[in-house]
């Protein structure tokens, strides 16, 4: 195989990995774009397998894998942003993600995103998860893929520091965590309490619903996997908080209570 | 003046208003893009002066002002987004914004953004301000303009519901509000306390600094307009929270304390 043919097949792989979720899981890897995130991936101990730089540019990042050249204009054609910065880095999906049941069994503070579709929201929530000290982020089937390049970018490296797995809300419930469902509008047969009145100090999962639909309406006090319903009382119009902001507020209230159990309103 | 010439001058105005802060203040108006935000502006009682629709499209919004046609392709050339939705709506800047001293004198819960530069952050913070029940948002000179089209869009209508003014941090201090400066890294001669330990129930202003630089390093316990320094203790890397997320966390802790003074840790 000529060097050119080899590179062409690598470029095809990069394009597939950036564009298709199934390719990422078939190949067991995803793409990190740019020097800052690549350095974060290396620092976090991820398995970086290859870094692609435009021919003639020699800023290769130690630990980010073997260097491959990209012909002129290829970076711009393949990358997911309009003004891409090299390198494109091939990173292995951590094996640990296979063991969602094991991670759930050990976790004490989990954020669950049920059918979240916006990559920016998913990435921001991973940042909140890291900052608030959550052990694990769960995305349900039907959510945006956490290795989607827009999620990778929006997470600003948090994705490399907090484990993220795919599981159903029912699987989270089966792990013995107490599930707090977030609800932003009145639904029949849901008893809601203000998030600041709920005891968030135990083994908990905060469960957030889809941007438009919320959590399934058929889930109530007695039906479905949710143990308690919480809401964020707020001023202004109901649309004023998006799901990423709401998750940030809930996660930091949990962090506040967990760092100082005396401040828990129920004790 | 022919109808065409008239329309050309209106199109030039739209372009200037979208592109230049000085034009917005010279003309006393700004542009709202799309049907959802235009309807929000009408519902909020803003003075909508004209709505521009592609010729032949008749979805004009009641209350959004006189309808003007846009020749084919003009919407796409003038609007600030890649795939614009009509209308472009000309809205008067509220007169009340002129009286920043009066608004500050009456306010009890203010968010101050000092030299915030990212439009998405500014817009998100306006959403938090509305949801957390802040009276007023202050942008200091040197911050992104709140009528920048990206800020208008990111605020998702919050800009029409919470007054926003331009003033210096010193002017905020002169109004008798207690200033809590947010600080995310150690600075010499700043005594910081956790935001959950601070009493945020009085007449307060939460002061947030620039995305990269924070608040001026020369402002300390004894120098500058800040009365108290607060910080958000968090897990993970220091970059994990951006300024919009940090503001959301602080504003909702203030809302929590203010809605339930008994839960204030200091009482």
Image (tube, coloured by chain):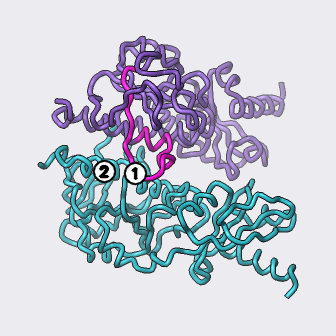
Chain colours: A cyan, B purple
Q: Residue at point 47% right, 54% down?
A: A127
Q: Are marks 2 and 1 in contact (CB under 8 Å)?
A: yes
Residue under label 2, please give it.
A255
Q: Residue at point 26% right, 65% down?
A: A179
The numbered dot on residue A216 is none
Badge 2 and badge 1 both on one subunit: no
Q: Residue at point 52% right, 15% down?
A: B98
Residue sticking out furthest to the bottom: A1
Q: Is residue A202 above or below residue B157?
A: below
Pick the front one: A89 or B211: A89
Residue under label 1, please give it.
B235
In what element is the residue under mark 2? Answer: helix
Residue A214 horizontal side relative to residue B125, left or right: left
Q: Visible in this render: residue A59?
A: yes
Instruction: Point out residue B69 in the picture as x, y percentages from the top left corner.
Output: 72, 40
Tell me the quarter of the picture where residue A137 sits.
bottom left
Q: In the rendered structure, which segment of residues is drawn in magenta?
A: B227-248
Is disc 2 surrounded by few (<14), some (14 to 19) or many (20+) residues within 10 Å?
Answer: many
Q: Is residue A191 above or below residue B65?
A: below
Pick the front one: A146 or A182: A146
In what element is the residue under mark 1? Answer: loop
Pick the front one: B225 or A50: A50
Residue A253 horizontal side relative to residue B160, left or right: left
Instruction: Point out residue A77 in the picture as x, y percentages from the top left corner.
Output: 79, 65
Tell me the quarter of the picture where residue A54 sits.
bottom right
Residue B133 horizontal side relative to residue B217, left or right: left
Chain letter of mark 1 equals B
Instruction: Point out residue A27 in the picture as x, y percentages from the top left corner.
Output: 61, 82
Pick the front one: A55 or A33: A55
Chain letter of mark 2 equals A
Q: Is residue A186 above or below residue B147?
A: below
Q: Residue at point 67% right, 21% down?
A: B27
């Amino acid at each position: 195989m000529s060097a050119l043919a080899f590179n062409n097949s690598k470029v095809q792989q990069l394009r597939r990995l950036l564009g298709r979720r199934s390719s990422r899981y078939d190949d067991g890897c995803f793409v990190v774009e740019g020097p800052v995130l690549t350095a974060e991936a290396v620092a976090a101990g991820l398995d970086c397998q290859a870094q692609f730089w435009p021919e003639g540019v020699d800023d290769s990042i130690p630990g980010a894998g073997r260097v491959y050249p990209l012909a002129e204009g290829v970076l711009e054609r393949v990358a997911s942003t309009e003004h891409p910065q090299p390198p494109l880095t091939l990173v292995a999906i951590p094996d640990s993600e296979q063991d969602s049941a094991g991670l759930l069994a050990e976790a004490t503070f989990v954020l669950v995103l049920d059918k979240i579709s916006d990559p920016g929201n998913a990435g921001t929530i991973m940042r909140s998860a890291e900052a608030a000290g959550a052990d694990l982020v769960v995305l349900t089937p039907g959510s945006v893929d956490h290795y989607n390049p827009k999620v990778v970018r929006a997470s600003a490296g948090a994705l490399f520091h907090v484990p993220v797995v795919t599981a159903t809300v029912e699987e989270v419930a089966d792990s013995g965590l107490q599930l707090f469902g977030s609800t932003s509008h009145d639904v029949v047969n849901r008893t809601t309490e203000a998030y600041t009145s709920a005891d968030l100090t135990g083994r908990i999962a905060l469960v957030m619903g889809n941007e438009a639909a919320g959590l399934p309406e058929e889930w109530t006090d007695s039906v479905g996997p949710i143990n308690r319903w919480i809401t964020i009382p707020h001023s202004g119009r109901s649309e004023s908080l998006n799901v990423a902001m709401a998750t940030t507020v809930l996660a930091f209230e949990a962090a506040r209570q967990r760092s100082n159990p005396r401040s828990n309103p129920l004790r």
